[in-house]
Image: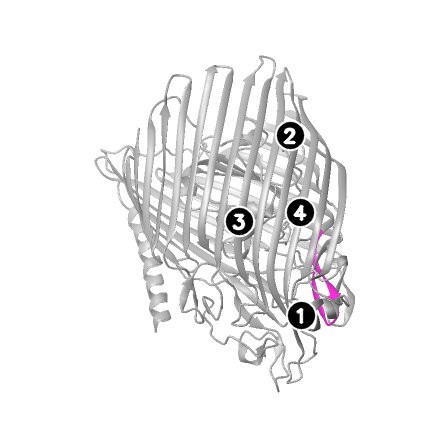
């Protein structure tokens, strides 16, 4: 009955949203209030390290404005999937370990010693560790998502693309500020704001902050008799801008985060057949037939209820500093970006999702990183050029005490033989990276240009670590059965190794401008991602063997235009990827079980299309749509299973690569009275079915889904005040964002957040 009422409320809310939009479309504007502009306007991006119109940029780039981020309530990287086509973002654990995939390219890993295939930059500073991917958005100017290899323009190499996050900068033009507060279901409360203070004609400060408080989590543990997933987050940023003259600017940024929240948990499923059951496991329709090796199963259908036996704290302490200097030399512009980040986190993972302790870990990560980038860019007649250098180092220290229980008997009968060990996963990794890069663009005619880019990278990485059995009970420890140890503590695995990667990345493009507002381009580019080491639990040195660098070559045809009197803007591209040695999770045999190993798959191919369109057919109405089409194919690769090693034949799909993704937005704004504006918007998002790992295991997959968000607001014409109501996932769709089989008789699935709704009040002053 409760679920029926929930669905009825969802349907009524969606109907009300559509009704409001229909009424708005038929209402005549009041003459007293100013009407919004009809043109979509010029879209200026910084994809090539300088401010350019998007119709001059031969790269597929999607820019999400500050206003769009706020209206969509986009607060973290996961929200980008609903705003940008051919982008998928999942979390290995709700609230932690985000994995970003662009056009099917994304590393399916959770190691804090690894870095994403998508280069993520915050104010031009690269984030070096997966551990840093769980960041939050606040007081941003805009976000740009670049698709395809980006090695010749950016500090670190990447194969999938780049995400550039730009904070709103200080200004000397005047005092300005904003404060927004909101409240939603699950007792969620948030406040964010900023103040910009010019202290002189050449010096200004901007102070920003945000807090997120949620007193009730989405998940409920029957064992603990309490909810999980509460939030307690504080973020702050101070920026100082000094412009001593019209040729020089110096920007200093300090920011920090204090997080004392809880992460979410996965919904258990069993992979062991119950006595007398002859079907396959897991069985989501009749889960009572499938258990773990302790004969436990969870038969309740609600993905947000379970028998989790431990609290899930998630603690983060981070601070960072950035120094950005620009100086116009007259004949060229010199830019220097210096960045430092000190990051630490701790979180508890109930990986067995059961009341017993079978696989539970208390993960601790500490990351320190430094980077320095210098660029020199200029223009002479028909030639544009840019050269740069980059240096960085990062140190990642991880230690994870945990408990692992493994059944060494083939069946869960009374004679089952369990070995339970206290384990300790530890690692120290240091990476140094240096690069030189450059770009040339030459105008052959007024309409035709040719450009090229080149980069050389020299990267070294050292790693010391492994997994240790610290049970202190030799007769019952894992090491007795896996490595024939005589006493404990003892190493289940250990490696002390170094790797180096030296490579060239390049890009070539031909640009044709048949008109001032249209660009057609064809390009070829190649990018690399360096190799590394797996940082999960390992029971053999083989699983710690370093994986090789990967290489991706992108062949692309693109088209950008402003049309219909600048009421319509289109950015589109067709692409084909030749992907070699892609880094992926496979398995290695360890006695009666097989565990994850991070390695390489020799070959893959990807092709598809991107389409973004924004149209303003009449005053106040904005329509936006994004379509991503994708076809992916893995080559054959070796792996392991219960019966020993085998080869997976060619033809599997890449993980987290939906064949179709779609996002749209319809927004209407109209004057309702003298000095007042009303607005409504409706935003659907669709993602096709995906597999969650390279083996394409059917039960480790996610079905296609639709998500519907909506927002309605009333604001003063000068936008000094705004009151808004919002709803996300209005249909309360429960779709799988991640699925994992732990290989020891159990697994779990992570589901999307349930329906959320609330209101917000914003006060802007200047």
Disc number lying in front (2 or 1): 1
Residue 374 can be seen, yes or no: yes
In the picture of the structure, the residue carrying the numbered disc 3 is 345
Magenta segment, principal secondary structure?
A: strand
In the picture of the structure, the residue carrying the numbered disc 2 is 511
In the picture of the structure, the residue carrying the numbered disc 4 is 428
Res 400 → quadrant: bottom right
Question: Counting other residues with Cα less than 10 Å from the Cα at mark 3, is it few (<14), some (14-19), or many (20 or more)?
Answer: many
Q: In percent of the image, x 37 and y 59: which residue is there?
A: 216
Q: In the picture, which quadrant includes the C terminus?
A: top left
Circle 1 — which element?
loop
In the picture of the structure, the residue carrying the numbered disc 1 is 473
Res 369 → quadrant: top right
Res 433 → quadrant: top right
**Is 585 covered by the magenta stretch?**
yes
Q: How far is mark 3 from mark 4, CA to CA? A: 15 Å
Residue 111 horizontal/vertical position (percent): 63, 52
Circle 4 — which element?
strand
Q: In percent of the image, x 38 and y 56: which residue is there?
A: 756
Q: How far is mark 2 from mark 3, CA to CA? A: 46 Å
Circle 3 — which element?
strand
Q: In terms of sequence position, does the residue under pointer 1 or pointer 4 come before the other?
A: 4
């Amino acid at each position: 009955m409760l679920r029926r009422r929930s669905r009825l409320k969802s349907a009524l809310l969606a109907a009300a949203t559509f009704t409001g939009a229909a009424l708005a479309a038929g209402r005549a504007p009041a003459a007293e209030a100013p009407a919004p502009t009809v043109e979509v306007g010029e879209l200026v991006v910084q994809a090539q390290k300088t401010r350019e119109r998007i119709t001059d940029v031969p790269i597929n780039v999607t820019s999400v404005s500050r206003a769009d981020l706020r209206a969509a309530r986009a607060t973290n990287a996961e929200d980008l999937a609903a705003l940008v086509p051919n982008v998928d973002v999942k979390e290995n654990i709700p609230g932690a370990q985000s994995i970003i995939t662009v056009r099917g390219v994304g590393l399916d890993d959770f190691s804090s010693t690894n870095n994403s295939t998508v280069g993520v930059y915050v104010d031009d500073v690269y984030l070096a560790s997966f551990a840093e991917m769980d960041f939050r958005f606040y007081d941003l100017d805009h976000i740009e998502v670049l698709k395809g290899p980006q090695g010749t323009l950016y500090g670190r190499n990447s194969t999938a693309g780049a995400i550039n996050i730009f904070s709103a900068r200080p200004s000397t033009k005047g005092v300005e500020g904003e404060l927004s507060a909101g409240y939603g279901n699950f007792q969620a409360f948030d406040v964010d704001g900023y103040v910009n203070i010019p202290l002189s004609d050449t010096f200004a400060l901007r102070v920003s902050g945000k807090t997120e408080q949620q007193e009730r989590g989405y998940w409920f543990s029957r064992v603990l008799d309490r909810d999980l997933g509460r939030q307690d987050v504080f973020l702050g940023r101070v920026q100082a801008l000094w412009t001593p003259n019209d040729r020089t600017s110096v920007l200093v940024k300090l920011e920090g985060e204090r997080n004392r929240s809880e992460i979410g948990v996965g919904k258990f499923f069993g992979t062991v057949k119950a006595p007398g059951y002859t079907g396959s496991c897991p069985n989501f329709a009749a889960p009572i037939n499938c258990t773990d090796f302790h004969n436990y199963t969870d038969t309740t259908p609600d993905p947000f209820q379970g028998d989790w036996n431990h609290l899930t704290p998630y603690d983060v302490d981070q601070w960072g500093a950035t120094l950005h200097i620009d100086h116009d030399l007259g004949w060229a512009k010199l830019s220097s970006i210096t960045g430092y980040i000190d990051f630490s986190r701790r979180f508890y993972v109930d990986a067995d999702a059961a009341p017993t302790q079978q696989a539970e870990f208390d993960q601790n990560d500490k990351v320190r990183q430094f980077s320095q980038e210098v660029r020199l860019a200029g223009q002479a007649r028909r030639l544009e050029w840019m050269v740069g250098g980059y240096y960085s180092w990062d140190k990642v220290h991880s230690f994870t005490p945990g408990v692992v229980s493994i059944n060494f008997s083939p069946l869960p009968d009374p004679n089952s033989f369990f070995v339970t060990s206290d384990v300790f996963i530890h690692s120290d990794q240091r990476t140094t990276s240096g690069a030189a890069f450059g770009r040339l663009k030459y105008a052959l005619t007024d309409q035709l240009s040719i450009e090229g880019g080149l980069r050389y990278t020299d990267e070294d990485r050292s790693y010391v670590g492994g997994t240790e059995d610290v049970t202190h009970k030799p007769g019952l420890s894992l090491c007795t059965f896996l490595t024939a140890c005589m006493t404990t503590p003892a190493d289940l695995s250990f490696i002390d190794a170094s790797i180096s990667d030296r490579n060239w990345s390049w890009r070539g493009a031909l640009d044709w401008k048949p008109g001032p507002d249209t660009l057609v381009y064809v390009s070829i580019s190649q990018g690399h991602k360096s190799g590394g080491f797996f940082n999960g639990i390992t029971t053999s040195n083989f699983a710690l063997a370093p994986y090789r660098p990967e290489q991706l070559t992108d062949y692309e045809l693109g088209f950008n235009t402003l049309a219909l009197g600048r009421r319509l803007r289109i950015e589109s591209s067709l692409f084909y990827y030749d992907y070699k040695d892609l880094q992926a999770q496979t398995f290695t045999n360890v006695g009666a079980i097989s565990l994850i190993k991070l390695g390489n798959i020799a070959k893959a191919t990807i092709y598809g299309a991107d389409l973004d369109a924004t149209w303003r057919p009449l005053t106040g109405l904005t329509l936006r749509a994004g379509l991503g089409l994708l076809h992916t194919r893995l080559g054959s690769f070796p792996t392991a299973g219960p019966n020993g090693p085998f080869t997976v034949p060619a033809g599997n799909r890449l993980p987290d690569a939906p064949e179709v993704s779609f996002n749209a937005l319809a927004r209407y704004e109209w004057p309702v009275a003298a000095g007042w504006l009303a607005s409504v918007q409706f935003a659907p998002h669709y993602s096709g079915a995906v597999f969650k790992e390279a083996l394409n295991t059917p039960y480790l997959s996610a079905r296609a889904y639709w998500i519907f968000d909506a927002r309605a607001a009333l604001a003063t014409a000068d936008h000094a005040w705004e009151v808004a109501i919002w709803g996300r996932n209005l249909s309360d769709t429960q779709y799988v964002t991640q699925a994992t089989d732990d290989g020891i008789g159990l697994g779990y699935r992570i589901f999307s957040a349930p329906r959320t709704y609330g209101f917000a009040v914003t006060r802007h002053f200047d």
